[in-house]
Each structure stands twice: as C-alpha cells, then as structure tokens.
Amino acid sequence: MTLSGHVVITGGASGIGEATAIALLDEGVAVTVLDADRTAVARMEDRFEGEDIAAFACDVTDEDEVDERLSEAAAAFGPLSGLVNCAGIARDMPAEKTPVETFRQILDVNLTGSFILCQAALEHMGDRLSIVNMSSVSGLRANAGRVAYGASKAGVAMMSQVLATEWGGHGVRVNVIAPGPVDSPMVKRLHTSEDRKIWTARTPMRRYGNVGEVTNAILFLLSDEASYINGHVLAVDGGFSPAGIMPDP
Ligand SMILES: NC(=O)c1ccc[n+]([C@@H]2O[C@H](COP(=O)([O-])OP(=O)(O)OC[C@H]3O[C@@H](n4cnc5c(N)ncnc54)[C@H](O)[C@@H]3O)[C@@H](O)[C@H]2O)c1
C-alpha cells in the first residue's frame, strides 16, 4: 500500500486506534495521537520516544484544544495527509433507562467530536486529505441496548457522506469503517460472556474480529490505492450486517 505524510489519530492510545498508529509508523508515516486518557498517552510517549510519533492528551469535544493540538502537530510533522477518528465511548442499556445526560455525552464524543476533528483537519491539510471515521454495525442495524451509541454511529456515517460530497472537489476523501464485534479494550469492558455468545451466534464468521483486521481496512482507505473511493461505508464485520437467516452453528 502507498502511504505517506502525516496522519492524526484520535483515540489512538488504545485498541483499534493504537493498532492503526503502530501500523502507520511501520509504513513510514508520521503519526499524531490525540487521546483523553492521560496515562495511556504517557505510556505511548515512553514507548515510542525518538520515533515519528507524538501523543497528546486531548478531549475531542473541546474544539479549542483540538485546534491547538493540530497546530502543534502540523508544526512538528507538516500538514495533515490523513485523519482517523477512533475516539469513542459506548454504553449498553435499555432506551428507557438511558439518562439524557448519557445520551448527550455519547453523541458529543462520537459524533460531534468526529465533526470537530474533520473541520480542524481541513484547516491543517496539505494537498490531499483522506479522512476515515469510525462508525459501527450498531450504526447500520438497530441493536437493542444501543439507542445512544447506535444513533451516534449512524450520525457518523451520514455526516461523513455529507463531508465527502462537499469536500470531494477539494482533494479530500471521507470514508467510514463500520466494525462488527472486535476484541479491543472497549469490548472487553462492555461485553459480558452472554453478550459474546449472542454476537458470535449472529456473526456468519462465528468469531470476533481482531484490531489488526480493522486496521488493515483503515490503512487501505487512507492509501493512494483508494484514491477514487469517497463517501463509502465499509463494514468490517465478518458478515454481521448483511446476514439474514443463518444455518445452525
Ligand atoms: N471494538 C469494537 O468492537 C468496535 C465496534 C464498532 C465500532 N467501534 C469503534 O471503534 C472506535 C475504537 O474503539 P476501540 O474498540 O478501539 O475502543 P477503545 O476504548 O480501546 O479506544 C477508544 C479510545 O478513545 C479514547 N477516548 C474516549 N473519549 C475520548 C475523548 N472525549 N477524547 C479523546 N479520546 C477519547 C479512549 O481514551 C480510548 O483510548 C470507537 O469509535 C468505537 O466506537 C469499535
């Protein structure tokens, strides 16, 4: 794959974002990680000292902080060639028990935070910019327990397609990954053993994905090989989203 330049990854200190940061570094791409988890950011700084990777504590819902961090990042590594919005939070609870405050918070981080980063990346882009936003199969299908998370992720997909439409003529591609169940720290926290049984039974490939399988798709969408792909939602889900009636396991 042909990858170059400088890519910013939000939520890059854990799970899919961290795996993407490491894979890009291996491809010779400069990486800036923005993450709200200060301890994980400090761990990344130690681990990658002296390499072309900078990690900053940053809350994606704070547009002033995001702008400052991207200015610093562009000064260090040059204008942005890519942005990967992985920062996200999830809760699993019945709609009637979901506090409005929780609903607002999930939309704020997952949807508004991604929007803030897309706007800021446009300001700091070089000749070309490839944006990859993280939706979910819960943004494509109505999964019980996901009223806020699902709404936020459906919003991410539509927001991205509007941006792809508006910015496609200006050297910007905006695409979306919709992962199915992927073994990451988030899912290890969220899914009980009963949840795991349900998700595995509903996934035609009968297993969870691993973070590397999502990272491969993100790198492809960032790369020059995806140069005419814009406004696409790519499910990386072992067949979860298209599946109907399935054979017995
Ligand atoms: N793992 C899955 O099965 C799965 C499935 C579908 C979609 N996704 C999406 O993929 C993305 C990555 O998920 P993951 O599984 O790697 O989760 P993760 O919890 O391992 O990583 C998410 C990161 O986002 C950071 N973050 C949270 N709120 C933030 C904020 N306000 N500002 C900056 N950073 C913040 C966290 O500190 C964490 O490091 C998320 O958007 C998630 O919704 C994951």
Image: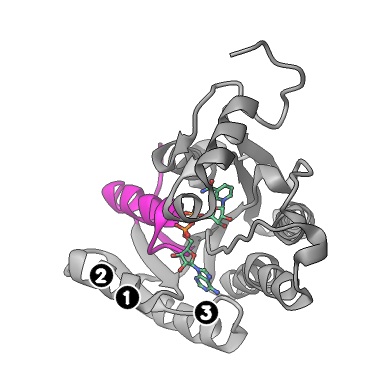
Q: Is residue 13 above or below residue 130?
A: below
At a point 50% along the width and 41% down the height, the residue shown is 193
Q: CA distance from mark 2 to mark 1?
A: 6 Å
Left or right: where 176 falls relative to 32: right
Q: Tell me if residue 237 can be seen.
A: no
Quadrant of the image containing the N terminus: top left
Mark 3 and mark 1 residues within 8 Å of each other at the beta carbon: no
- Asked if the beta carbon under badge 3 is closer than 8 A to the nearest atom of ligand 1, the reply is yes
Identify the amino acid type marked 1. Answer: Thr
Q: Which residue is mark 3?
A: 59
Q: Is residue 21 magenta?
A: yes
Q: Is residue 187 above or below residue 234?
A: below
Secondary structure of the residue carrying numbered label 2: helix
Q: Which residue is mark 1?
A: 39
Left or right: where 163 falls relative to 209: right
At a point 40% along the width and 71% down the height, the residue shown is 78
At a point 68% along the width and 74% down the height, the residue shown is 108
Residue sticking out furthest to the left:
50
Q: Tell me if residue 210 can be seen.
A: yes
Find residue 41 and report its horizontal and vertical position in percent: 33, 73
Find residue 5 and report its horizontal and vertical position in percent: 40, 58
Binning the other alpha carbons within 10 Å of mark 1 as few (below 14), some (14 to 19) or many (20 upward) gives: few
Residue mark closest to the camera, 3 vs 1: 1
3 or 1: tag closer to the N-terminus: 1
Magenta range is: 1-29
Q: Which residue is mark 2?
A: 43
Binning the other alpha carbons within 10 Å of mark 3 as few (below 14), some (14 to 19) or many (20 upward) gives: some
Viewer-side residue, 77 vs 11: 11
Mark 2 and mark 1 residues within 8 Å of each other at the beta carbon: yes
Secondary structure of the residue carrying numbered label 1: helix
